[in-house]
Image: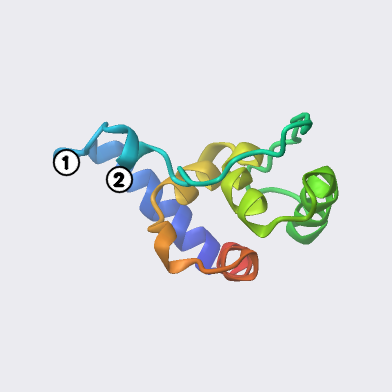
Amino acid sequence: MTRKLRSLELAMKNLQGLGGYKSVSYKDLCMFPGVHLPFDFKMPKFEKYDGHGDLIAHLRHYCNQLKGAGGKEELLMAYFGEILSGLASEWFVDQHIDKWISWDDLANEFVQ
């Protein structure tokens, strides 16, 4: 029920437009500016999650894809938006990321 409510809220925001000024500076647009990929890291092609299907299985698949990055939580968090599409992506972009101290924080909030 909570996920459906969030989806409806995001849809309403989209219908209303920006509703005010939003900064387009790099520091405001880049959600994780301090995260750097390992030198030899090759970005996997991520399967997108649009809000349908087994969410836990999708998160497990994502974590397994990033094992090559050394299992670093900051990389899991930084590239999480790459696996999302549609309303799931809009939810992520609307979040204040400073509230997430760890991958567990982000993942737990996402599945609620």
User: How far apart are the alpha carbons under marks 1 and 2?
Assistant: 8 Å
Residue 25 location, quadrant: top left
Q: Dot 2, how many residues are within 10 Å of its Cα: few (below 14), some (14-19), or many (20+)?
A: few
For image coordinates 43% across by 58% down, the residue present is 97
Residue indicated by mark 2: 13
Quarter placement of the C terminus: bottom right
Say what secondary structure mark 2 lies in.
helix
Q: Which mark is residue 19?
A: 1
Amino acid on which disc 1 is placed:
Gly
| Up/down of 100 relative to 48, above or below | below
| Up/down of 106 relative to 33, above or below | below
Q: In the drawing, does residue 53 fall left or right of residue 89? A: right
Between residues 47 and 79, which one lies in front from this camera angle?
79
Q: Dot 1, how many residues are within 10 Å of its Cα: few (below 14), some (14-19), or many (20+)?
A: few
Amino acid on which disc 2 is placed:
Lys
For image coordinates 74% across by 31% down, the residue present is 43
Q: In the drawing, does residue 58 fall left or right of residue 105? A: right
Q: Tell me the colour scheme of the image.
A: rainbow
For image coordinates 57% across by 63% down, the residue present is 106
